[in-house]
Image (cartoon, coloured by chain):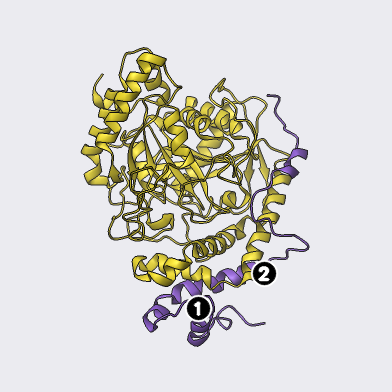
Amino acid sequence: MTDGALSFLTIAEASRLVRRGQVSCLELTQAALDRIDQANPTLNAFITVLHDEALDAAREADRRLATDGPLGPLHGIPVSLKDLYDTRGIRTTAASRLMAQRVPQQDATVVTRLKQAGAVIVGKANMPEFAYGGVHPEYGPAKNPWDPARSPGGSSSGSAISVATGMSYASMGSDTGGSIRIPAAFCGVVGLKPTYGRVSRHGVVPLSWTLDHAGPLTRTVRDAALVLRAIAGQDARDPSSSARPVPNYARGLPRQLENVTIGVPQDFFYDELDSEVERALDAAHASLRRLGARLKRVSIPHASDSMAAVSVITPCEAGAFHWQALRDRPGDFSDAIWGRFMQGLLTPADTYLRAQRLRSLLMNEFRDAFKQVDAMVLPTVPILPHLLGERPMTREGISAIGRCTGAFNLTGLPALSLPCGFTGDGLPVGMQLIGRPFDEATLFKIGHAYEQATDWHTRRPAV
Amino acid sequence: MAGPEERKPNRQSLEEMARMVGLDLTDEQLDKIAPDVDALVRNIAALKAIDFGETEPAFVYRPDPWAECPRLSND
């Protein structure tokens, strides 16, 4: 098998080959590093590439495989990390000048769990500064693998690119207002924002304590299920993490969707869609019906206010986290980020509390809607990947990009983005599946069945 | 009732608000922050327009109320 073919296997496929001794962990890792060397100069997906460390880890994974057998489905699988996951002895910058030389003394909990599962870390992925929009000039923008003139989405941009282009089999991202799902949609891969509390945030540089979620990006839904199983679960170092048991999500994923009712929100989420996004979602609805699912209209009356709440909570909490640096080292922030964080410090407490009250309202509305349905389907992003440097806005003057994603950071509900079509110009379109709290399993079932009936997830960018 | 534009803080009040949280802003920084203050004023207006009734803030996701929400499918 060629390196190129190796790089685009799914985790499930690569894991099978590793277990059977048909491919070594070292070969998988070398293939991923070769892809990074080939494509990264064009796409700028990585801040740090761990050539030597990854090859050493792969050799150790082969040695352990020979002596102890496989640790699990991630044994020897190359993965990347958004550069805000702490990595012991390896700098973790959050794409900022402020943390440019920061070398953590311990791994984030998720990194520890990935290593315990046998995964091989190949690099630290590029991202906007502190995962909040602006690109720090010292790191430069990551580029969309389907059209390098366009945005890959953010903020887990390098993560999505690395998965889409075979530089890694999975990548860990973070999501405060859509930052896993948006780049997943723009780059044509799968992105999961788990339920708040499902995955530890310990050792992930915070943007907003109450909105941040850690989650994986992969090339298939099954692979997302495999990664979530490895990283989820209670962590004493993250007080918000849940003690609920972690299911074996990948077991028994179905090909049909009988007895499944999927809600289609009538308010807000389907407004102002690009015509090609609308067409892709219409076709996805038809596919879900053919698989046996029943689609039912639901209503979330305050969905349209979600962006205002996310836009208040995020800078307030980020400003509080960065207050000392804002005072002592303001010149180490890019102008865009400095202004947003300052906005948070100047926000009246009453406004912050109104945003948190909206959170309660939305939770109540989603809870009512989920009395009628098992999951919901909606677009991930209402627009197509835009040209780098542009900032598309809605009619209401808010960012169009996070319009359909922020509500699920407020409510903590699990949300899975997966490819559901391509435009005439070859740009990917994503759809989101939303579930009840801690019911990622239903999202995996629906997403997997949809994937088996379509071939969007098998397309690869030419880069 | 004043509209969002009328409620926008002037330069001096912004400077004082920043000083209150421990930051002395330069003239250049006050210029730079203007678009973010505009965004904040819009968000304040949007959130003020919502009738919250007696709804309390949530802060983070709380799972318990969902225990009463029955599943539909048989699995």
Q: Which residue is label 2 attached to?
A: B49
Q: 10 Å neighbourhood of mark 2: few (<14), some, or many (≥20)? A: few
The tint of chain B in the picture is: purple
- For the point 75% across and 44% down, which residue is it? B65
Q: Is residue A199 above or below residue A127?
A: above
Tell which of A284 and A19 is nearer to you.
A19
**Amino acid type at mark 2:** Ala
In x, y percent, where is residue A358?
A: 66, 59
Image position of A278 (left or right of A65): right
The tint of chain A in the picture is: yellow
Q: In 3D space, how far apart are the residues under numbered discs 2 and 1 (Cα atoms)?
A: 26 Å
Q: Is residue B5 above or below residue A11?
A: below
Image position of B24 (left or right of A50): right
Q: Is residue A269 visible?
A: no
Q: Is residue A453 visible?
A: yes
Quadrant of residue A245 in the image?
top right
Q: Is residue B19 above or below residue A145?
A: below
In what quadrant of the picture does the C terminus of chain A appear? top left
Q: 10 Å neighbourhood of mark 1: few (<14), some, or many (≥20)? A: some
In x, y percent, where is residue A331?
A: 34, 70
For marks 2 and 1 on the same chain, the one whose residue lies earlier in the sequence: 1
Q: Which residue is label 1 attached to?
A: B18
Tell which of A193 and A292 is nearer to you.
A193
Q: Secondary structure at mark 1?
A: helix
Tell which of A94 and A424 is nearer to you.
A94
Q: How many marks?
A: 2
